[in-house]
Amino acid sequence: MAEGDKKRVVVAIDGPAGAGKSTIAKRLAERLGFTYIDTGAMYRAVALWALRQNIDPGDTHRMEQLAMAAEIELAPGRIRLNGEDVTEAIREPEVTSGASKAAVIPGVRRAMVAKQRAMGERSSVVMEGRDIGTVVFPGAEVKIFLDADPGERVRRRFQEAQGKGEPVSEDALAAQIAERDRRDRTRAEAPLAQAPDATYLDSTSLAIEEVEEAILRIVRARIANGKEFH
């Protein structure tokens, strides 16, 4: 296949908090040799910048300005904001809360979508988030809506937090996830929803390897019988 004939492919994975999107997207990107785009990390980067500038993450006008100005670069396992590696800094609880507030601002979402689309035009990507298959890449070749039972999503997040030594209770996590679900599904701009042509996958009772293999089968079946992969 000539270089010019190679088709850029977008694999879009949407779903609620704690469904396992990030873990699966990273693994898939590695298996397929695609670029992994962590959309949540992009919103977190903007929220981090806002907090450092003492800007309220709910300030519509100033947050939109920051989102447009932010220079965000993604590399395997790392994220840079305006040239600085902020991979660890964006995982602070205050940033998580700020990112959730920033993500409901229409102007911030539009700025992030523009950056995400630009990344998808440069190479084949696996992108996960809340509105990838419905808004960012409605024409994506592969769309997955990854879901899990709310109790299982809380359990996974709790295990993750324990593994990192974060002092958090299961009840607090349950409340956080319920609030994020409410915000995601009710926001005016691009609410969380399954695209009509997305494949629904319930990961509640599946091991991570089983989810990965299920999606790989879908990807390979959809894209030229595997001819895109080298």
Image (cartoon, rainbow, N blue to C red):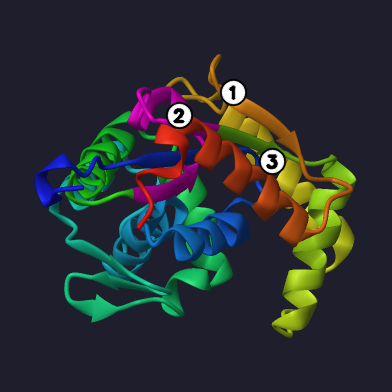
Q: Is residue 139 magenta?
A: yes
Q: Residue at x 27, y 72 (%)?
A: 80
Q: Residue at x 10, y 45 (%)?
A: 4
Q: Is residue 68 magenta?
A: no
Secondary structure of residue under mark 1? loop
Q: Residue at x 45, y 58 (%)?
A: 32
Residue 31 seen: yes
* Frontmost residue, 172 versus 130: 130
Secondary structure of residue under mark 2? helix
Look at mark 3 in the image and give the residue it sits on.
Answer: 179
Gap in angstroms between the C-alphas marked 3 and 1 = 19 Å
Q: Earlier in the sequence, mark 3 or mark 1?
A: 3
Q: Earlier in the sequence, mark 2 or mark 1?
A: 2
Q: Earlier in the sequence, mark 2 or mark 3?
A: 2
**Relative height, residue 23 to residue 114 (above, below):** below
Q: Residues within 10 Å of mark 2 (few under 14, many from 20)?
A: many
Mark 2 touches mark 1? (CB < 8 Å): yes
**Relative height, residue 83 to residue 224 (above, below):** below
Give residue 16's mark: none
Magenta range: 125-143
Dividing the image into 4 quarters, which one contains the C terminus?
bottom left
Locate residue 27 relative to residue 5 in the image: left or right. Answer: right
Locate residue 210 relative to residue 33 in the image: left or right. Answer: right
Look at mark 2 in the image and give the residue it sits on.
Answer: 133
Give residue 165's quadrant in the image.
bottom right
Look at mark 1 in the image and give the residue it sits on.
Answer: 194
| Amino acid type of the residue that numbered disc 3 sits on in the rendered structure | Glu
Across and down, in percent, residue 132 comes to 43, 34
